[in-house]
């Protein structure tokens, strides 16, 4: 089958990472996409990313500064990859559907629940694919973890605890918009990973009760951390970032939530980007027969299962014996190159990141060419956004909220200001 003629909007850090994902696909023998054009309002960012694409893919994509101009000019295009900051996702997706193009969009799917629902409606009306690039669930170790939970290895699930805290005054990944409520904020932008993975592992949530707060009210614009520098060093600062080295944060940086799942299990999620001192990163699930500590996504480290009455976890290799029918899909096996029964892998962050992006892009390709639904469809992407907003809505209202009320846009008090700004 001929490669999909692909456009990409966004040439910042995530845009560059998606180019590496396309290169990974090509190097693994998948002739799935021809990247024919890039769009970014900053010419230098677009030129840099185009250069990386040319070196890795063999053809230099054409460059545009306006997405409408690109859509008008590139008549052979079949799909668009949206990797801008979250605020632009829904508008760009609607333009693409109007132009008859399939859409794959970075997480979070959109800036609000209502914006997500607008995108879903447009994709269904147009009969076009809408896929969300959510990579954590695609990690081979997380695939194995889901299989272990479904096997009943730790019995009936009782309690899930996810705790991630860190501190400091710097903006995250040198992008100040991550700390602005009307551009997304960290509980949406980072927390949507946890939201999607929690729903993937444990099923639907019934209700959420949360406390949220903004502690770090000013943020300092600094260089990206070493691990992320190669992805973001070419990014052009926005005007308000150029005007001052300090920005006023407006989105909550701390959320503590208690969850009740449809299954009856209880969960607790704590996220804070305003907790100086010792950081923490814990993700563990307790059942009637023992516990399962999740791997850190993209680390390649194995899960740890500890049974009732034992102090030491089960040997990681032995865990595969508990799930004899577990197999990774052919695409993931081929891209990671370690067979279809992986319980750990040894890759750098850069390698893991581009491999997982390659997997999600190939899933999009399969959905477009076969007519099936992508794994992370618009509805699945909406669930993750609604979960993050259930935390923010509950904190805003100082009361529990029913998850489905947030998902159906019946509870949207926190989001009202954002919806008005983006005119939906």
Image (cartoon, rainbow, N blue to C red):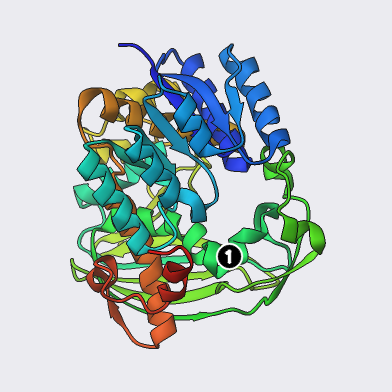
Answer whether residue 99 is visible to the viewer in this image: yes
x 29%, y 71%: residue: 406
> Is residue 392 placed above or below 227 in the rendered structure?
below
- Across and down, in percent, residue 31 comes to 41, 13
Answer whether residue 265 is visible to the viewer in this image: no
Q: Is residue 399 left or right of residue 323?
A: right
Q: Secondary structure at mark 1?
A: strand
Residue pointed to by mark 1: 280
Quadrant containing the N terminus is top left
Q: Is residue 266 left or right of residue 81?
A: left
Q: Nearer the viewer, residue 401 or 10?
A: 10
Q: Quadrant of residue 210?
A: bottom left
Q: Nearer the viewer, residue 19 or 329?
A: 19
- Across and down, in percent, residue 69 comes to 52, 33
Q: Residue furthest bottom?
A: 398
> Is residue 365 placed above or below 220 in the rendered structure?
above
x 81%, y 64%: residue: 244
Q: Residues within 10 Å of mark 1 (few under 14, many from 20)?
A: few
> Is residue 342 placed above or below 30 in the rendered structure?
below
């Amino acid at each position: 089958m001929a490669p999909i003629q692909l456009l990409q909007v966004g040439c910042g850090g995530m845009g560059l990472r998606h180019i590496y994902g396309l290169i990974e696909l090509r190097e693994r023998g998948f002739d799935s996409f021809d990247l024919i054009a890039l769009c970014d309002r900053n010419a230098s960012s677009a030129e840099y990313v185009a250069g990386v694409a040319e070196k890795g893919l063999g053809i230099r994509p054409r460059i545009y500064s306006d997405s409408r101009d690109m859509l008008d000019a590139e008549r052979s295009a079949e799909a668009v990859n949206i990797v801008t900051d979250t605020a632009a996702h829904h508008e760009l997706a609607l333009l693409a559907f109007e132009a008859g193009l399939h859409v794959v969009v970075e997480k979070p799917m959109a800036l609000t629940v209502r914006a997500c629902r607008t995108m879903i409606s447009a994709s269904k009306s147009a009969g076009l694919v809408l896929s969300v690039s959510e990579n954590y669930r695609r990690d081979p170790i997380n695939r194995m973890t889901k299989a272990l939970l479904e096997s009943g290895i730790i019995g009936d699930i009782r309690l899930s605890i996810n705790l991630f805290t860190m501190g400091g005054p710097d903006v995250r990944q040198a992008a100040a918009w991550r700390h602005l409520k009307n551009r997304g904020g960290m509980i949406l932008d980072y927390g949507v990973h946890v939201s999607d993975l929690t729903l993937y592992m444990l099923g639907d949530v019934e209700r959420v009760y949360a406390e949220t707060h903004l502690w770090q009210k000013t943020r300092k614009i600094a260089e990206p951390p070493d691990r992320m520098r190669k992805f973001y060093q070419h990014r052009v600062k926005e005007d308000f970032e150029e005007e001052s080295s300090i920005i006023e944060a407006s989105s909550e940086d701390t959320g503590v939530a208690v969850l009740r799942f449809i299954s009856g299990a209880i969960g607790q999620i704590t996220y804070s980007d305003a907790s100086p001192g010792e950081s923490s990163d814990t993700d563990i699930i307790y059942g009637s027969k023992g516990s399962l500590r999740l791997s850190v996504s993209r680390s390649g480290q194995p899960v740890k299962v500890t049974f009732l009455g034992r102090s030491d976890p089960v040997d990681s290799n032995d865990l595969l014996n508990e799930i004899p029918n577990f197999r990774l899909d052919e695409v993931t096996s081929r891209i990671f190159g370690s067979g279809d029964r992986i319980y750990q892998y040894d890759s750098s962050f850069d390698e893991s990141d581009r491999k997982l992006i390659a997997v999600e892009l190939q899933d999009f390709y399969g959905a477009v060419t076969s007519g099936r639904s992508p794994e992370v469809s618009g509805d699945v992407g909406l669930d993750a956004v609604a979960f993050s907003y259930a935390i923010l809505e509950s904190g805003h209202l100082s009361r529990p909220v029913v998850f489905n009320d947030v998902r159906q846009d019946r509870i949207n008090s926190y989001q009202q200001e954002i919806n008005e700004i983006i005119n939906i």
